[in-house]
Every structure is written in C-alpha cells, then in structure tokens.
C-alpha cells in the first residue's frame, strides 16, 4: 500500500499551530529546567490541550476532525523537534487510548474532562515487569478473587508518573478466568494509589527526564469491584494492538528529535570556524551532514507509512510498525551521535541540546519493545509475506 503524504489544509494549519506553540515555550533554557523538574509547567500543558486538536476524541475514535494516527504523528514529531526532547503528551495519548477501550464511557469521560481542565492525566499506566518487560507471557502480577474480594499482587516497573497520579491503570493476569489455550487471560484494573498495599519507588535513569518513572508494588491489595474494568479477560493479542499504536507515536518522537539534532548540527557547522574556515566546508563534515539528512528522510518515510497503514487497516501494518520501530529509534541515536561529534566537546555538555537528544533517543530503542523484539515480530511476518 503506497501512502500519499501530501498534507491537507487542516493538517498544515495544525502543524503551524504546534510550531508556534513550540517556538513560544520550548527554549533550550526552559527544557533544561523542566528536565530538572521532571515535568512541564501547568500553564504549558494546559495551553496545549486548550489548542483543541481533537486528540482526546481521536483516541476514542470520535473525533469530528479529519483526524488520524498520521496526523497525530505529525503533531508529536513537531513537538519533539521543537523541544529536542521526549514530551509527555505522547505517553498521555497512549495511556488514554488504552483506557478508552476498557473504562465505561461515563468513567472515561470524567477522567478526560479532568485532563482537559487541568492538563494533567489522572492516572498512570503499568504493564512492564522487572523479569518480563512487556512480554505478557511471562507476566506474574495477578488479580484473583479471595473470599469474595478482588486481591492484587505483583510488581510493575517503569511506570510513568506512577508516584504522582491518584489512579494506576494496571494490566495483570486474571486469576478468575481460564484461557482457551491454558494461558491466563489479562485483566485491566484501575487501582487507586492510596489503597493499602500499594507502594511506589522512583527510578533513577538517564534521559527522558520529563517522564518520571517508578516501580509500583502491589502486596495483597484489596480492590473495590469497580476497579476491574475488563470482564471475562482479554488476550495478549489485544494488548499488542495497543503497543502497535504506541510504537508509531514513539517513533514520531524519535523522528522529531533526530530532525532537531540535524538542524542544530547544520547551523553549527556553518557557524564554527577551524583553521580559518567554516567546518561545513570540510568534506568529512559535509559527508556526515548528507548522511544524517538521508537517514532522517528514510525515518520519516517509514513512520508515515506505518501510520498510514494502521489508519487504512492494511494487512501490512503490523510488519511496517515493527520495521519502523526497529529502524527509527536506532537511526535517531546515530543522527544524534553524529550531531554531537560535529559539535565536538560542546556537544557532550549541557551547553547544547544534542546531548539531551541523544539520551532521549537512546531510551526509545528500549521502550515499547526493544530493537531485538521488533526483529522477532518482523521475521515470521516476512516469511508469511514472501513464502505463503
């Protein structure tokens, strides 16, 4: 399926609005401070939501706009380009997308309305585990009925905002349901943070410092019946559909950050002088810049193709998404690394934003499924495509 990447007037207008928003708020000094704060200021997140791009309606499939995953990818790419950083809005959208599939409409709308009003998402999303990652086949966190009460036990890790939200959307094994293949189906639970037995611990990490991660432990947590959002369980395949959507969004962030690194490197190369000449006149620098441009163009094509195929319901969407997630984050790291090299010692300091870009891009190689997992997904799909 060949995608048409020509932007509609509406998409162009949206991008102009996002670009103006980024130019207003995402200065290098602001981003440096917000990284230390591990958060965007309230007025910034509220202003973004007030721009009303229909993103909340998009995750529920109810947008009145000509909205699509392709359009959302454009928005997230531009936000990350302007900021030179991973921005929390992409994680918020994925979390809302998952919640919309499980919460009752009135419950979801209460959370969405609070998000619109404050700019702060009222829940975090917990799926990864220390010894399983996002591989649900090895998941051990479980909810089961004990003496007529729902009880949750387990350990989740890398939970964005897990320490700060009043609710946690937890994916766990459903101990009360038997799967057709013998494997336990999954359950979606909306767990109040203040219940007895819930504990959180911050995770110190490199990069993506605008996303504060934590470990969340559940020790015999007794849940009210309303906490269980999914009746009868759901499958690993269902969850993988959410991951596919999220992988495109994280790839959009990587493309935006790589574009930012490229733009900074070009500007510096035509400004910096060495041996009486602009370093942009040196053949090795020229080759690096040309290769960086080729990589960014290729990344962008793979991103848009994957988003387009998901929007169109193409049978190739799963393969295109896996290939994009395999190629784009890794290549974004290469582009950011080359930008650091062009800057020299300045690039390895906080004087320039390329070092922060490299840190954030490196994290995307791991989140939402590692490079190696993407190969594991792609290989059987390639066999099916070419040998069946």
Image: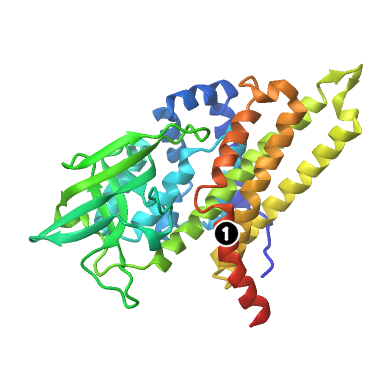
Q: Residue at x 86, y 35 (%)?
A: 286
Q: Residue furthest top?
A: 276
Name the quadrant containing residue 115. Answer: top left
Asked if residue 297 lies left or right of residue 318, the reply is right
- Foreground of the two, 295 or 149: 149
Q: Which residue is mark 1?
A: 374
Q: Position of residue 87 (x, y in %)?
A: 50, 38
Q: Residue furthest bottom?
A: 388
Asked whether residue 264 appears in the rendered view, the answer is no
Quarter of the image with the N terminus is bottom right
Label 1 crowd (10 A; few <14 / some 14-19 / many >=20): some
Element class at badge 1: helix
Q: Residue at x 57, y 47 (%)?
A: 365
Name the quadrant containing residue 320. Answer: bottom right
- Foreground of the two, 135 or 333: 135
Asked if residue 367 lies left or right of residue 333, the reply is left
Asked if residue 95 lies left or right of residue 261, the reply is left
């Amino acid at each position: 399926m060949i995608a048409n990447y020509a932007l509609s007037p509406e998409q162009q207008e949206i991008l102009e609005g996002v670009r103006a928003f980024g130019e207003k708020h995402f200065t290098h000094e602001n981003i440096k401070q917000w990284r230390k704060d591990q958060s965007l200021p309230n007025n910034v997140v509220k202003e973004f939501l007030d721009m009303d791009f229909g993103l909340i309606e998009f995750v529920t499939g109810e947008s009145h706009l000509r909205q699509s995953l392709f359009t959302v990818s454009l928005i997230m790419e531009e936000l990350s380009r302007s900021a030179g950083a991973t921005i929390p809005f992409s994680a918020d959208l994925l979390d809302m997308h998952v919640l919309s599939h499980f919460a009752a409409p009135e419950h979801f709308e209460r959370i969405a309305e609070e998000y619109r009003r404050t700019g702060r998402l009222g829940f975090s999303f917990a799926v990864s585990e220390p010894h399983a990652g996002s591989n649900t086949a090895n998941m051990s966190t479980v909810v089961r009925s004990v003496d007529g009460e729902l009880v949750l036990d387990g350990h989740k890790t890398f939970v964005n905002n897990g320490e700060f939200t009043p609710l946690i959307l937890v994916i766990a094994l459903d101990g009360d349901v038997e799967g057709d293949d013998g494997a336990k189906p999954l359950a979606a639970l909306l767990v109040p943070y203040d219940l007895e037995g819930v504990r959180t611990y911050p995770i110190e990490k490199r990069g993506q410092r605008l996303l504060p991660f934590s470990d969340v432990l559940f020790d015999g947590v007794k849940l009210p019946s309303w906490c269980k959002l999914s009746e009868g369980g759901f499958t690993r395949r269902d969850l993988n559909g959410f991951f596919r959507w999220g992988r495109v969004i994280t790839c959009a962030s990587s493309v935006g950050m790589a574009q930012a690194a490229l733009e900074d490197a070009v500007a510096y190369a035509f400004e910096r002088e060495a041996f009486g000449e602009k370093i942009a006149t040196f053949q090795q620098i020229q080759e690096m810049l040309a290769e960086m441009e080729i990589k960014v163009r290729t990344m962008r094509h793979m991103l848009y193709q994957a988003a387009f195929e998901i929007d169109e319901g193409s049978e190739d969407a799963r393969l295109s998404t896996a290939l994009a997630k395999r190629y784009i984050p890794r290549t974004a790291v290469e582009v950011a690394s080359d930008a650091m090299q062009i800057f020299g010692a300045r690039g390895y300091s906080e004087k320039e934003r390329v070092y922060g870009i490299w840190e954030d891009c490196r994290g995307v190689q791991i989140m939402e499924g590692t490079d190696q997992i993407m190969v594991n997904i792609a290989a059987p799909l390639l066999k099916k495509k070419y040998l069946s």
